[in-house]
Amino acid sequence: MKRSTLAATLFITLLAQNPSLAQEVYFEKGLIANLPSRYGREAVYSDELAYRLYTGKLKTPVAGDSIGSNERGQAIVWQPIEADSTHRLRPRGGMGRGGAPAGPGVTPGATRGGLGAGGSYIYLTYNSSKAQPALLNIKGNSSVFVNGVQHTGDPYSMGYLYIPITLKKGLNEFYLRGVSAVASLIFPEKPVLLNTEDLTLPFVVLNHQTGVLQGALVVLNTIARPLTNLLIKTSFEGKQVSVAVPVIPALSSRKIPFSFDGSGVRAKGKYECTVTLLDKGKTLDEKKLTIEAVTASEQYNSTFTSAIDGSLQYYSVTPQSGTYTSKSALFLSVHGAGVEAINQARAYKPKDWGTLVAATNRRPRGFNWEDWGRLDALEVLGIAKERFKPDPQNVYLTGHSMGGHGTWFLGATYPDQWAAIAPCAGYPTMKGYGSADGLIPDSSSNPMEQLLLRSGNQSDVPKLATNYKAHGVYIFHGDDDRTVSVNYARQMRKQLGEFHPDLSYYEYPGGSHWFGDHSVDWKPLFDFFQWHHRLPDSSANTIDFSTASPGISASFRWATILQQTVPLEYSRMQLRRDRTAASINGTTQNIRLLKLDLKEFATGITVKIALDGGNVISYTTQSNNDSLVLLKENTQWAISQHPDARQKGPHRYGTFKDAFQHNMLFVYGTTGTAAENAWSREKAIFDAETWYYRGNGAVDIIADKDYSPEKYKDRGVILFGNKSTNSVWNILLNDCPIQVERNKITAGDKTWTGDQYGAYIVWPIRSTFVTSVAAITGSGVKGMQAASANQYFAGASGFPDFMIFDLDMLHSGAGALKMTGFYDHNWQIDEKNTSYSK
């Protein structure tokens, strides 16, 4: 096939929502090949096309040419693909994607999409008459290589993702990972644009939420230099507000916060707000958007600044209809895949005895309520407790579909937070129901991959099922659910029925996945809630608590697991407190360091503690707020000291993902070769794009030369590059037992030489007690490219403290792992919990 038949066909479109985006070019023809790849909820991935691209073995696609063979020995051939009348590129034979999420605000039967997208790549080209900027918009792909540079995709076909790129003069090549997509290039009239297609907005709530409020929108920068010192000004109902704009890196986008003054609104309705982007008084772009005003009795949105990355997020509220009292309740509702939080809140009629708050999971699909979705739920829970001041004994958790999983997960992970939980149409674990990113692998014969999978143990909530004894459980599911089988509910009913004293279960006859608002707003469910109250800590004398990681969940009532014996294996404590006898007795599993809160014992009382059938420990309380730390060595417990904050503990327990919080900062290297520096910056942009798409995120991106621990104190750092290419390495990782430099990686007494090794490493930032640095690194450009995939953003994917791998992983999978493992409590390589290749 001649290349001209692959080139984009020109359509000039005036885009109604964004008049500054004046000309759009759709790709109408291309080639597709079903290349082997493996992306999912795990650290190991493979991608045959990327492997060939990185090793220089990828030939220019031609129709009919073979590009190898699949696992069945069949030839993989580039085949023509054409767009239909909607500009969607579809392969011949109709390779489709199934799935149908449902919930408030989701059309039944809507496609789920798929982040894995079947392993296909679509090849497209565009001949440009000159070097020029453009915006790339693709709907339906998981990622795309643009002239060899990787960018994120829009697997859910949301449509709001515009990627600033520079086209070179002549042939430009695009490899889209996906089986079907709509792809276009847009040539903007302005070099800097405001995009209002993906807004985060609060409501004005009359007599309740007025004054200066915050929203967020996207700035697109098609210029080859960063945008600095900009202002964003709003004009709303006669009130004007201006705020500074964070730095927008060259050829990138960023979702930025802005402020508007809602105090001029006097009545319910929708109002126009003008947003202007200014550079030294000059208007770069201006947009109008709509702000909604509601009464205090209606559902509404509120926004907040997230501690994870400093971005603006929102939650939704269904206000209490009755008078607030000291006994008022709080209901945290977690939504299903594809559901906006405001639609989740609107599915519930107001209750006269409590306020319902719906968190977002960072996005309608987000992280399955794990990882940063979990943190979002905790942030919103904390805000809601402070804002609405419910009775601490009347806090409840519920959710639907993916939010049903979120209810199972959060209910098991933080069992002492809730009086009762109610999963609706939910699945318990990502090992059985994988959704778009696929399943969490259940097992592996590879010892190194086994350690990777251990990193995801916190997701397997059936292993934590005894935690549900802390609260009531109401399971609600339609018996004709074709999306999330009712068998998941039956599985949990059977498991909990063997030990749980406070379980209620109901299958809705003929109920599909979503059968109306009563799929969640079910009166017997809320009656069940109203009958339940959380015991205060002073009355909870029995503890049965398990966790997979103290860094995620360490405490239950008056006991805290500070350190494990075996990192990220399941730990359990079963304790009984007798205040009359002044004793604590019980058993433990996989606990090295345990803290007991003794404030319920009077000052001067001698408390006797017997654990695991060992020696009795006597301790006399020193104050009315005393606590005791116990250390287990071999088989005996002994009184110890609280560990130094520089050791591992609940405040900073590791795994690679732990660095991606605390207002994290991306730092790319500039001290390497041109190719090394280019990869570092391009990878930072790729991760920022993915973080924005998956997590509604916004992150600062800086060069290594601009970093200092004092300027960016108490912020997590994501470092791109190695010791030779990123000067921040010697500031933050100089004492790490794993060192990566050009052509060499050393880990303890092991050394790997060559440029093909990649690694993911976490390490504590020594100048603080809570933050970490995550290094996305390699021993050369090939190794860095091997580390390019950002599967750590896949919800519930397991990443340990460190892993080293060969570029060949993209071709052969887990067989190319070189080392995986964990640090011990002193942040040294734990040889007992580290695996090496032979």
Image: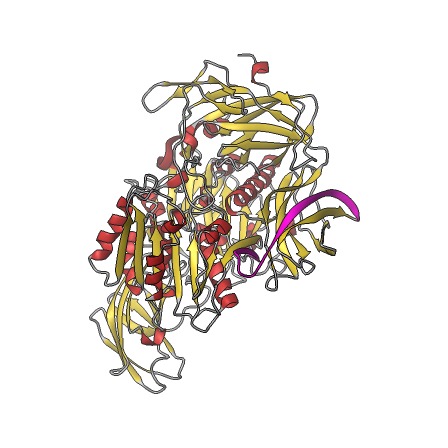
In the image, residue 523 lies in the stretch drawn in magenta: no
Chain part drawn in magenta = 281-305
In the image, residue 291 lies in the stretch drawn in magenta: yes
Q: Position of residue 681 (x, y in %)?
A: 60, 41
Which color mode does the image show? secondary structure
Res. 789 in view: yes
The quarter of the picture where residue 214 lies is bottom right
Q: Residue at x 29, y 74 (%)?
A: 541
Q: Nearer the viewer, residue 467 or 555?
A: 467
Q: Nearer the viewer, residue 77 or 680?
A: 77
Q: Position of residue 478 (x, y in %)?
A: 31, 46
Magenta: main secondary structure equals strand
Residue 249 located left or right of residue 402:
right
Q: Is residue 576 above or below residue 145?
A: below
The quarter of the picture where residue 826 lies is bottom left
Res. 754 in view: no
Q: Nearer the viewer, residue 66 or 820?
A: 66
Q: Nearer the viewer, residue 658 or 615?
A: 658
Q: Is residue 187 above or below residue 406?
A: above
Q: Residue furthest right?
A: 281
Where's the C terminus, which quadrant?
top left
